[in-house]
Image (cartoon, grey):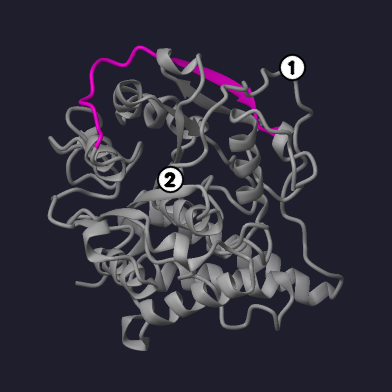
Amino acid sequence: MAFRFGRNPFLEAWRRWMVFVIACGVLFWMLLLGPVSCTPPQQSPSERQLLPDLRATLAGTTVSGLSSGAYMAEQFQLSHADIVTGAAIIAGGPYACAESAFTGFMPDAGVQILSASRAASGCMLDTLALYGVPDAKKLADRARELSEEGRIGKISDIVTDRIYIFSGTNDQVVRPRIVAKTVEFYRDVGVVESNIEAVMDVPAGHAMITLDKGGSCSANDLPYIVDCDYDQVGAFFQFLYAPAVKPAGPAAGRFVEFDQQAFASDLPKSGLAPTALLYVPPSCDAGGCRVHVAFHGCQQNRDSVEAAFTRDTGYGRWADANKVVVLFPEVEKSALNPLGCWDWWGYTGRDYLTRDAPQTRAVRRMLGRLAGAEIKN
């Protein structure tokens, strides 16, 4: 059966965005004056709470994410493999999937157009399979290349991580075969089989999966949280933090809304929202807790779904039981990023795959602040 964008609101929004990006690129070539800025001016910041120093322990940091958040979780994990020990990749394809072969040979606007097209066709809808896209082995080689250049972490640190990978059988946004290539990518990088848990048999749509929150299990629509009688956060907490994992109880911690711009004032292309949330279990005020970073998916920031991603997915229950602070960084919608996606195709610049990426740098600074360090890099 032929697939049409109009059948899914997410993909219809992506289609409209692609038309916009192409229009910006055409205007760029017509003017020959450098990249066209299609981002509206940011509002002036108001008084916001600072991210607290919780004397957190950064060794053993874990990450998770849905869709664009899954790609971002991979990028952050590989970039900071020295502190990250595990990642939960939900409905995300392999690292560097969207990178254009013309990166480094074309102006930014042209590269962004090609990468965005490749992202939609080859890393979501799976329409480039006949051309070998995505090629997990080549992408693993790309990760090794970036590691050897010192632009991401050491491969020796990456291969010891624990990786949870999920794809719903009814996902119409990022097709299951694309996610299966993520499994191949981690195998090709060198992660041992016992450190990879792939869950590919739940009849879920494109979403975070819960025991009793969200829409019907097969839904592919806002808020991208569905009820499949499956505790996904619990599943990946138990895998990432094995073997010493305590069972979840009621969430009793607090949410702190903090100023993200304090970590991006010198990163004008970061795309970060003015504020984000931190979840602090009661036991973590005394210090010594580990950190989990949860990256939302496209159209899943608070502007789109309010508190659904932070409160309904179950992070708090497992974080409380296991002394884990949960950082919920957030990107905002803009003219070049109207779906509020994390950057996995290069809209923030050519370094988006590396530790020099604006979003990666900002989140690493947030972790440093949680551990009591000064903002650096």
Q: Which mark is residue 297?
A: 2
Q: Quadrant of the N terminus?
A: bottom left
Q: Quadrant of residue 152?
A: bottom right
What's under tag 2, amino acid-wise? Gly
Q: Is residue 254 on the magenta stretch?
A: yes
- Badge 1 crowding class, 10 Å Cα cut-off, few under 14, some 14 to 19, many 20 or more, is few
Q: Is residue 284 on the magenta stretch?
A: no
Q: What span is in magenta?
A: 244-261
Mark 1 vs 2, N-terminal side: 1
Q: Which residue is mark 1?
A: 47
- Badge 2 crowding class, 10 Å Cα cut-off, few under 14, some 14 to 19, many 20 or more, is many
Q: CA distance from mark 1 to mark 2?
A: 27 Å
Q: Residue at x 59, y 40 (%)?
A: 332
Question: Regarding mark 2 in the picture, which secondary structure is present there?
Answer: loop
Is residue 275 in view? Answer: no
**Position of residue 126 measured from the top left corner of the image (x, y, whole percent):** 33, 72
What's under tag 1, amino acid-wise? Glu
Q: Are marks 1 and 2 in contact (CB under 8 Å)?
A: no
Classify 80 as above or below 263: below
| Main SS of residues in magenta | loop
